[in-house]
């Protein structure tokens, strides 16, 4: 019977980012391919049948695939330079929970599957939760096929080079109809559990969130010969936008706005940039508030761009409504887990996408610092082990497992 940390130790060397620190594991790259192989091997070693669906998600079935299944799992890709747990903890804990159920002689009375969703972070193609959105039919597959990574490689091409066909991308009613309940275990990405002195929580909600690209266009020029009053420098409105985002979000309760990525072109120290791309990630508890914030920031961006003789083009790259997890399922899991607290989160998840189609829930494992999307992300091994025990109890309950 493996613990989550024993399983995570097996992939500790995969996708280590020597430059940024932490892990860079992106959909269809070598590291992610290795992780898929690792998962397949682990699931097969447990006698599970493994397949990849038309949207590049992996499915491992304990027994015959069938309707009204209880599905658990998470993702194996990361943000650039991410931590070891965001995603992989949920996958490792699913396998560890299955081991526990078997060791305890529990036989599920409903089909049980572990899934690994593709491109949850949007770390390569910019749109998060692609695998689950495609499956659920909440994103146009033609749009996905056209997405490009920062080096210009298209999604369809990357999928083909990973040995998969992009032809069948899109809503998968057969797979959807099988999911009776979905439960995702995840490392907590805040300090809610530290304050409550509990190792495991149940999720209550997810903020409404999205990503927008602001492309500022000016005139590339010489840094030494272009007088200061004769410039159209897109770095100026771009920088204003970064400052305005902090200020605007600070004025809206529970809101967050982040410029985590800014790319000047051509990017020379002695060059006035010709274009600057800034990606904004904006979130808040309410859909309207999130959209109002983005509208206000768009106006600021346009005004500042005009002041500098620049143009700005704004593109919405992704959007996710506020998620309130199924209240009955949440309360049920709280009861199974002896009154585990219910916590909201600002992070997006595949469970949030699936919540629009099927009753879904999440378990969070305590993170002592709350740090996530960074190499310092951590959870104590004892807490991870408790998380897997909690997941096993939840799976036993939801599959109406029989003990022999
Ligand atoms: C995913 O982790 C997100 O919320 O960006
Ligand atoms: Mn993440
Ligand atoms: Mn995640």
Image: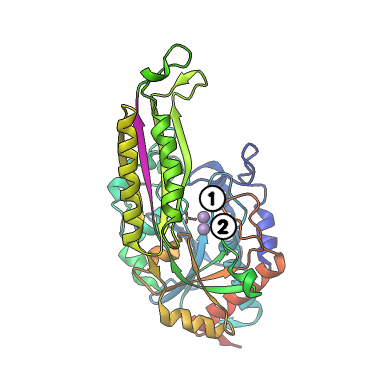
Instruction: Please say whether residue 315 is visible from this viewpoint.
Output: no
Mark 1 residue CB less than 8 A from any atom of ligand 2 = yes
Comparing 46 with 139, the one in front is 139
Residue beneath disc 2:
86
Place of residue 90 in the rendered image (x, y in percent of width and height, measured from the top left): 56, 64
- Give residue 325's mark: none
The residue carrying pointer 1 sits among few (fewer than 14), some (14 to 19) or many (20 or more) residues within 10 Å by Cα, namely many
Give the magenta part as a residue range.
210-218
Place of residue 131 in the rendered image (x, y in percent of width and height, measured from the top left): 41, 55
Q: Residue at x 31, y 37 (%)?
A: 303
Q: Does the magenta segment cover residue 269?
A: no
In terms of image quadrants, where is residue 339?
Answer: bottom right
Comparing 7 with 48, the one in front is 7
Prevalent SS, magenta region: strand
* Labels 2 and 1 touching (C-beta < 8 A): yes
Comparing 383 with 93, the one in front is 383
Can you say whether 110 is above or below 228 in the image? below
Distance CA(mark 2)–CA(mark 1): 7 Å
Can you say whether 81 is above or below 109 in the image? above
In terms of image quadrants, where is residue 9?
Answer: bottom right
Q: Residue at x 61, y 52 (%)?
A: 83
Place of residue 268 in the rendered image (x, y in percent of width and height, measured from the top left): 50, 21
> In terms of sequence position, does the residue under pointer 2 or pointer 1 come before the other?
1
In terms of image quadrants, where is residue 299?
Answer: top left
Residue beneath disc 1:
78
**Quadrant of image for the C terminus:** bottom right
Instruction: Please say whether residue 403 is visible from this viewpoint.
Output: yes
Which residue ends up furthest to the top in the rendered image?
A: 225
The residue carrying pointer 2 sits among few (fewer than 14), some (14 to 19) or many (20 or more) residues within 10 Å by Cα, namely many
Can you say whether 391 is above or below 209 in the image? below
**Quadrant of image for the N terminus:** bottom right
């Amino acid at each position: 019977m493996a613990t989550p940390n024993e399983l995570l130790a097996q992939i500790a060397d995969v996708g280590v980012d020597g430059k940024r620190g932490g892990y860079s594991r992106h959909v269809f790259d070598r590291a992610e391919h290795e992780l898929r192989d690792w998962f397949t091997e682990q699931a097969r070693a447990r006698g599970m049948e493994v397949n990849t669906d038309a949207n590049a998600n992996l499915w491992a079935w304990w027994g015959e695939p069938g309707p009204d299944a209880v599905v658990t799992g998470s993702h194996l890709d990361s943000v650039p330079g991410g931590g070891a747990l965001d995603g992989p903890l949920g996958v490792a804990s699913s396998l560890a929970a299955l081991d526990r159920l078997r060791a305890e002689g529990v036989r599920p009375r409903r089909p049980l599957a572990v899934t690994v969703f593709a491109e949850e972070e949007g770390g390569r193609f910019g749109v998060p939760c692609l695998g689950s959105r495609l499956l659920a039919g909440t994103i146009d597959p033609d749009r996905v096929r056209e997405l490009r990574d920062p080096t210009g490689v298209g999604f369809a091409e990357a999928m083909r080079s990973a040995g998969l066909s992009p032809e069948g991308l899109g809503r998968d009613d057969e797979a959807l109809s099988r999911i009776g309940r979905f439960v995702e275990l995840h490392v907590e990405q805040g300090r809610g559990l530290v304050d409550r002195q509990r190792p495991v929580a149940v999720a209550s909600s997810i903020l409404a969130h999205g990503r927008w690209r602001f492309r500022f266009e000016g005139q590339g020029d010489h840094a030494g010969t272009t007088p200061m009053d004769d410039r159209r420098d897109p770095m100026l409105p771009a920088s204003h936008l970064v400052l305005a985002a902090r200020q605007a979000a600070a004025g809206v309760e529970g809101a967050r706005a982040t410029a985590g990525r800014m790319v000047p072109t051509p990017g020379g120290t002695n060059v006035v940039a010709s274009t600057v791309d800034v990606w904004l990630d904006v979130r808040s508890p309410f859909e309207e508030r999130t959209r109002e914030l983005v509208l206000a920031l768009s106006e600021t961006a346009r005004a500042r761009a005009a002041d500098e003789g620049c143009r700005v083009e704004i593109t919405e790259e992704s959007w996710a409504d506020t998620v309130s997890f199924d209240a009955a399922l949440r309360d049920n899991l709280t009861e199974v887990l002896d009154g585990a607290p219910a916590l909201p989160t600002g992070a997006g998840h595949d469970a949030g996408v699936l919540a629009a189609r099927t009753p879904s829930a999440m378990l969070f494992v305590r993170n002592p610092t709350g740090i996530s999307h960074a190499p310092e992300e951590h959870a104590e091994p004892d807490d991870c082990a408790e998380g897997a025990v909690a997941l096993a109890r939840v799976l036993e309950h939801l599959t109406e497992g029989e003990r022999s």
